[in-house]
Image (spheres, rainbow, N blue to C red):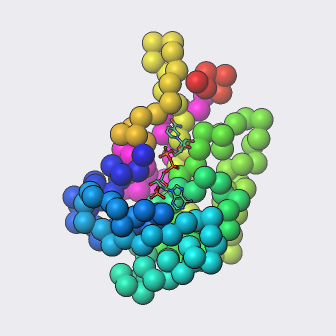
Amino acid sequence: MLSGVCEALAAEGTRLTLLSRRASAWRGAVVEAFDCDYRDEAGFASAVDAAVAHSGPVDVAVAWFHSVRLPANRRLAERIGAGTLVQVLGSATADPAHPDRLETARAVAEGLRCRLRQVVLGFQVEAGRSRWLTDREISLGVLGAVHRDDLVTVVGSVEPWSARP
Ligand SMILES: NC(=O)c1ccc[n+]([C@@H]2O[C@H](COP(=O)([O-])OP(=O)(O)OC[C@H]3O[C@@H](n4cnc5c(N)ncnc54)[C@H](OP(=O)(O)O)[C@@H]3O)[C@@H](O)[C@H]2O)c1
């Protein structure tokens, strides 16, 4: 869903590093690839260290993890230094029944030097019907957040919550 972000940043001339389980299989824009599983805390931390050793300090990290509770979130934030961490979060972060979730997600950067920016993936309501975002909408929304630098960005909408697909 974030491949559009990779392509757009590459087109802007950004030097990109991709970390995922099959990063080296990526066939899009030129990137440095480091295969790793973010559920393997030590392996993930080693991959980020290797990426920084290879490519230099991180300016911007766009991060998608299935859960903010995974230790890899903190391991990444620690390695960003004074760079920007763009944290992509699922719509459940905006659930009004759990108003603490955005704050809980922020805790991954607590006490660290990195600049945290949060992006909540919402949904679209069109002609009275709602649907989830497309990959393109997600990538455009995340890219906009990278460029605008707002503390919190909602892609699409999260209100009214009862309209969630
Ligand atoms: N709000 C909305 O409208 C909306 C719309 C679409 C999706 N979403 C949410 O976004 C989520 C992501 O969807 P997705 O279909 O793109 O699937 P995904 O399985 O989360 O994959 C996204 C990326 O993460 C990497 N990845 C996944 N597990 C990993 C791991 N353990 N370690 C390292 N990298 C890992 C994958 O690359 P590798 O396979 O190479 O590891 C892939 O490039 C969905 O679960 C959904 O909740 C929300």
Residue at point 45%, 70% (across, down)? 35
Taking 66 as reference, is 76 above or below it? below
Residue 107 figure quarter: bottom right
- Coordinates of residue 89 in the picture (x, y in percent): 58, 49
Residue 163 figure quarter: top right
Residue 29 in magenta stretch: no
Residue at point 42%, 46% (across, down)? 1
Residue 149 in magenta stretch: yes
Could one spot residue 115 in this view of the protein? no
**Apparent side of residue 125 relative to residue 160 in the rendered image (left or right):** left
Magenta residues (range): 139-160
**Apparent side of residue 136 relative to residue 76 in the rendered image (left or right):** left
Could one spot residue 122 in this view of the protein? yes
- Coordinates of residue 104 in the picture (x, y in percent): 72, 56
137 and 103: which one is in front? 137
Residue lying at the far bottom in this picture: please name it. Answer: 53
Residue lying at the far top in this picture: please name it. Answer: 128
**Apparent side of residue 15 relative to residue 132 in the rendered image (left or right):** left
Residue at point 36%, 67% (across, down)? 24
Query: In this figure, what is the number of numbered marks?
Result: 0
- Coordinates of residue 92 in the picture (x, y in percent): 66, 40
Quarter of the image with the C terminus in it = top right
- Coordinates of residue 6 in the picture (x, y in percent): 33, 57
Residue at point 48%, 63% (across, down)? 21
Taking 21 as reference, is 145 above or below it? above
Residue 138 figure quarter: top left
